Amino acid sequence: MTAQFPFDNSYARLPTRFYTRQNPAEVAAPGLIAVNHGLAERLGLTLPESAEDQARLFAGNDIPDGATPLAQVYAGHQFGGWSPQLGDGRAVMLGEVVAPDGARFDIQLKGAGQTPYSRMGDGRAWVGPVIREYILSEAMAALGIPTTRALAAVTTGETVLRERAMPGAVLTRVAASHIRVGTFQFFAARRDVEALQALTDHTIARHYPDADGPSGLLEAVIGAQADLVARWMGVGFIHGVMNTDNMTLSGETIDYGPCAFMDVYHPETFFSSIDQFGRYAFANQPQIAAWNLAQLATALLPLMPDRDAAIERFTEAVNGFAERFDAAWHGVLRRKLGLAEDREEDAALAFDLLDRMAQGGGDFTRVFRALSGPNPALAEAEFRAPRVFGPWFEAWQARLAEEHRDELARVTAMQAVNPALIPRNHSVEQAIQAAVAGDFGPFHRLNEALSDPFTDRADILDLQAGPEEDEVVTQTFCGT
């Protein structure tokens, strides 16, 4: 059986200055690591029957009928510094598919070889970043957070030179689109108003059909990003590289390079080896999102007939991000604490817990999960300095009592939003190290467990535990 993808490649119908047409570079000996069959069914894909043919397909050696492979161009601010041309330096988009329900998705191969945008890079990926993105993106999807998805991972039979020779791999990524803030910046910087208008019209039609022009698009993206960052923070997620080329217009999480989840809570936590000063630390993410959105607003200005009025309107919209984020973040925290009623003082109660977790070394995920149980006092054991917990616990119990809520309803509601399992850094690292040695068992076990993150299971207690002292991961790395 040959591959059948329901392609309808609208991005490829945009002007040719939006991309470069090229096929993925073939690899020597593709081998299958994993295929996400549930996602393939969601997309309406028909895949080859044999593992060998699937590996050739997802390595880029076989191109499905109807594909129009291309590498997208974009620009961006990276750690605050302007890069006038970036683009897909190691990725090739095969095309867009229209799923059975009418939803549209990009299918992209990461690690597919050099493109005109590689900037002296080799265009390849090694197995570590491929394993990381597969695990993290699928975990985020299971947690209910908007994200790109992993459709497949394959080995290439080739080596990739980083600090040392590493086994090569390719990830097949699925996204609602790969349109980024940096895509708009690319054309705005070149004063290409015609391309900017075409991109705006395309983005509105694809993601926000009710948006009224550039202003409506900006408002919609601000709302999507406020909700997304609040959801990130609700599970202790730190993106690590919130550059403008890594912020999508669709409101999906994208580019899982040095991303990580916190173990012990602290607002200044960051892991990325290239984030030397903590620009993208956990607590900085809302402010960075607002800064990125200001860059989007600037890029949209050339489309507005009255520049001065547009500056005033866009400034007000971007400044409104803080209020929209606060509302989303407070809602996330209220649900994590099992509070059904919205009261003004609830945010202070939640922030008091976070402060005490920072002071007392509380494990972010395990504290909230313990609070979700029938005996929430057990959360005290998740603090390295448990004495800080008692006063807050009494205040929380008093607040819960004011709602007269059924205890079972509270437990059920809290366990639906406070995961029992996250992709902890040391577990991901163990899966990567095993994969480098050719053992994908830990990857498959972790990925299967993370598909149901809100259920306690006796057989994955080791995956739910925080790291031992010698397992703590202090830095994460990009794959380039």
Image: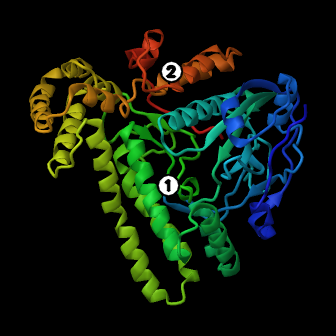
How does the figure colour the protein chain or chains? rainbow
Amino acid tagged 2: Ser
- In the foreground, 369 or 191: 369
- In the foreground, 449 or 463: 449
**Closer to the eye: label 2 or 1:** 2
Q: Which residue is mark 1?
A: 79
**Which quarter of the rendered picture does the C terminus lie within?**
top right
Q: Position of residue 327 (x, y in %)?
A: 30, 55
Q: Is residue 270 left or right of residue 75?
A: left
Q: Position of residue 123 (x, y in %)?
A: 76, 44
Residue pictured at 68% horizontal, 50% vertical: 105
Say what secondary structure mark 1 lies in: loop
- In the foreground, 190 or 444: 444
Say what secondary structure mark 2 lies in: helix
Q: Which residue is mark 2?
A: 427
Q: Is residue 174 above or below residue 328?
A: above
Q: Is residue 330 left or right of residue 279?
A: left
Q: Position of residue 223 (x, y in %)?
A: 43, 60
**Which quarter of the rendered picture does the N terminus lie within?**
top right
Amino acid tagged 1: Phe
Residue pictured at 51% horizontal, 33% vertical: 142
Q: Residues within 10 Å of mark 2 (few under 14, many from 20)?
A: many
Q: Is residue 328 visible?
A: yes
Mark 2 and mark 1 lie on one chain; the one further toward the N terminus is: 1
Residue pictured at 57% horizontal, 47% vertical: 254
Q: Residues within 10 Å of mark 1 (few under 14, many from 20)?
A: some
Q: Is residue 304 above or below residue 256?
A: below
Q: Is residue 36 visible?
A: no
Residue 259 tag number:
none
Disc 2 from disc 1: Cα separation: 28 Å
